[in-house]
Amino acid sequence: MIAIGLEGSANKLGVGIISHPSTGKPALILSNIRHTFVSPPGEGFLPKDTAKHHRSWVVKLVKQAMAEAKVSIKDVDCVCYTKGPGMGAPLQSVAVAARMLSLLWQKELVGVNHCVGHIEMGREITGAQNPVVLYVSGGNTQVIAYAEQRYRIFGEALDIAVGNCLDRFARTLEISNDPAPGYNIEQLAKKGKVLLDLPYAVKGMDCSFSGILASIDILAAALKANPEQRDPITGEVITTADLCFSLQETVFAMLVEITERAMAHVGSHQVLIVGGVGCNERLQDMMGLMAKDRGGSVFATDERFCIDNGIMIAHAGLLAYETGFRTPLDDSTCTQRFRTDQVSVKWRD
């Protein structure tokens, strides 16, 4: 079976085509194309501008994906699209495009939960069997484990997502959004040496990032007013890189803590990191140290699959399609709020 997947819940528009061969064989990625709406430094991406970008590029990307995959319309079994969660206007643009393809090609629709797409693609690529999942992106922060055909949420962000915290600090620093603000924060953090004191907000299995962002914004403003500011303990001159380093070390330590607690609770020795922030090498290293101490292992993918993409939607959609799931045209809506644990995962035991 072959599916085409359309993803556009935020500023990345992705189109992917996947093939599921006979039982027991790995999925075949036929094409996985993405185009990103990049806003100017110091600015975020507005829903209306992002939606316009998606509408402008979706037909081009579909044609390119079909050509790269070397498949025809008759080869495609279903059209999968991101139903949610995400930003309203971009989601609508992709849902309209998916409906158009469904009607034009006479193919059935499958609405996909964005997070489930990340999890299933991560499991397929890495081979992780039944891991605790850390889902970290610009819009979501969740610690998840599978039980009884549901992905159960053990802990999550109480306010803003960790990726949103990093992205907004990039705006404060007015650094480039190309290729991504979080990536540029990561590169700056590699040059940092001074660890500054920031709030550490773990509350049971949940995290809070808004207070940390407010605190680091205050430090950034003070550094801008006095560039020769020194750390009171080491006497080192504080730099922008030190701010990025301190922010990363603090928020990632929080994520490692709640993930370890979930591993202990469910008795798992595997961690799968998915979502755009999952590309961060420092997060992977910190999680790896924790997992090693527990005799476990960490699984993660590269930017082709960590960052929002169409192939993950095609894969998760085709898994659901193979169990008999369909999204009728009348129900082919999108929603900004679509919890991970709302999805019935019938393709797993």
Image (tube, rainbow, N blue to C red):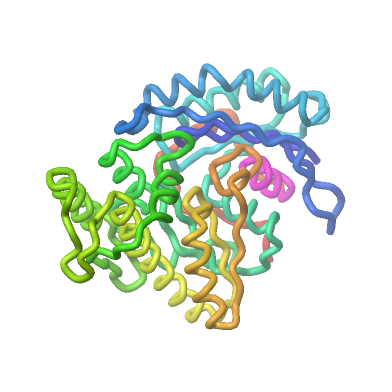
User: Left of 286 or right of it: where is 300?
Assistant: right
Q: Is residue 271 visible?
A: yes
Query: Toward which corner of the image does residue 190 lie, by quadrant?
Result: bottom left
Which x, y percent locates residue 340? 49, 54
Which x, y percent locates residue 121? 64, 51
Q: Is residue 198 visible?
A: no
| Quadrant location, the C terminus | bottom right
Q: Nearer the viewer, residue 232 or 341?
A: 232
- Numbered range of the magenta stretch: 313-323
User: Left of 209 or right of it: where is 261?
Assistant: right
Number of numbered discs visible in the structure rendering: 0
Which x, y percent locates residue 107? 72, 28
Q: Residue at x 36, y 70 (%)?
A: 205
Q: Residue at x 52, y 58 (%)?
A: 281
Query: Toward which corner of the image does residue 131 lie, by quadrant?
Result: bottom right
- The main secondary structure of the magenta stretch is helix
Examine the structure image and report whether residue 318 is included in the region drawn in magenta: yes
